[in-house]
């Protein structure tokens, strides 16, 4: 969902995780939110996602090693593009990638894209937020700022870390996977979803029919639209439901004409 932006700067992809003998072992989801203005942000996110998938599919090793290597490849792809087109220097992107397998969920992220787990009606953010928002929230808790002041703070969207083709300042990549349970919902999204509070996200996800694949993401997008935020950021949402019916494989998201269970972009 493009929202109030002139350009669509989000990119995303789903891919099967294929093991030995071509056996499908799980699902990979990647979400990137570009920055740099106009076509630069769009180019950065698409380039990063493409490089990530290519490296992941050809890399051996553990899932964590493959995620790390693929993140490095995405960053290197941006550096190569800068050498080819110096005028693009300064563009960049966030990147979140998660693998869902029988072992649980592994992830790696840089920037402020969101990874949530909804389990039995409780929503929990899994990955770190590399934006200034974390400091603003702390200032709200200490009384230094009001929620209203934080909402319009000029630094609220600044990032401490992103893919810029240079050294990556911060990444979030836990060593061990988080075990998943039957019925868990995994939500991967760009930060445009933060037009909604966590309570609102929970309310939407728990109020839609869970048997209809695609419905939770569509409902989240509609909720973002209803807010009618005048400067609504691009919003991409992917929702994956964990099912143990097929051992080692989560239930795949719907793929309605290139819109897998995702909230387009607002």
Image (cartoon, rainbow, N blue to C red):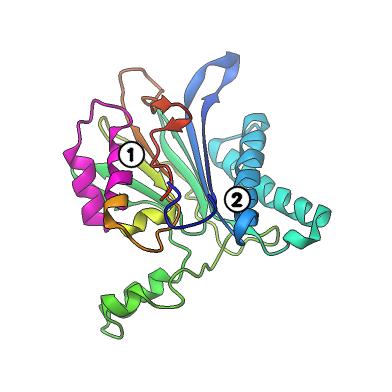
What secondary structure is the magenta-colored segment mainly? helix
Residue 1 placed where, x, y %? 42, 46
The residue sitting at the right extreme is 84
Quarter of image, res 57 = top right
Q: Mark 2 — residue?
A: 42
Does residue 41 appear to the left or right of 33 in the view shown? right
Q: Please state which of residues 48 and 219 is positioned toward the viewer in this rendering.
A: 219
At 40% from the left edge and 78% from the top edge, which residue is drawn? 153
**From where the camera sits, is residue 69 visible?**
no
**From where the camera sits, is residue 132 visible?**
yes
The residue sitting at the bottom extreme is 144
Residue 217 placed where, x, y %? 33, 39
In the rendered structure, which segment of residues is drawn in magenta?
A: 196-224
The residue sitting at the top extreme is 21
Asked whether residue 5 is drawn in magenta, I would say: no
Measured along the vertical axis of the image, is residue 183 above or below residue 172? Answer: above
At 36% from the left edge and 53% from the top edge, which residue is drawn? 193
Asked whether residue 208 is drawn in magenta, I would say: yes
At 62% from the left edge and 47% from the top edge, which residue is drawn? 71
At 43% from the left edge and 26% from the top edge, which residue is drawn? 255
Mark 2 and mark 1: Cα distance apart in space:
22 Å
Q: Please state which of residues 191 and 222 is positioned toward the viewer in this rendering.
A: 222
Q: Mark 1 — residue?
A: 217
Mark found first going from the N terminus, 2 or 1: 2
């Amino acid at each position: 969902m493009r929202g109030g932006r002139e350009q669509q700067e989000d990119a995303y992809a789903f891919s099967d995780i294929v093991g030995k003998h071509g056996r499908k072992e799980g699902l990979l989801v990647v979400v990137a939110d570009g920055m740099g203005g106009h076509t630069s942000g769009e180019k950065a996110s698409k380039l990063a996602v493409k490089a990530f998938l290519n490296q992941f599919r050809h890399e051996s090793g553990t899932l964590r090693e493959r995620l790390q290597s693929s993140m490095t490849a995405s960053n290197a792809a941006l550096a190569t593009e800068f050498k080819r087109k110096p005028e693009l220097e300064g563009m960049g992107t966030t990147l979140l990638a998660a693998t869902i397998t029988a072992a649980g969920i592994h992830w790696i992220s840089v920037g402020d894209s969101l990874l949530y787990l909804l389990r039995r009606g409780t929503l929990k953010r899994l990955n770190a937020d590399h934006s200034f928002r974390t400091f603003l929230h702390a200032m709200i808790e200490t009384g230094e700022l009001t929620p209203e002041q934080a909402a319009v703070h000029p630094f609220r969207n600044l990032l401490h870390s992103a893919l810029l083709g240079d050294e990556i300042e911060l990444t979030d990549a836990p060593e061990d996977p988080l075990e998943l349970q039957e019925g868990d919902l995994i939500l991967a999204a760009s930060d445009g979803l933060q037009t909604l509070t966590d309570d609102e996200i929970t309310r939407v996800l728990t109020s839609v029919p869970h048997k209809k694949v695609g419905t939770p993401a569509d409902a989240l997008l509609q909720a973002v639209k209803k807010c009618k935020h005048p400067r609504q950021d691009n919003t991409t949402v992917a929702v994956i439901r964990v099912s143990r019916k097929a051992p080692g494989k989560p239930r795949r998201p719907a793929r309605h004409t290139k819109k897998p269970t995702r909230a387009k972009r607002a």
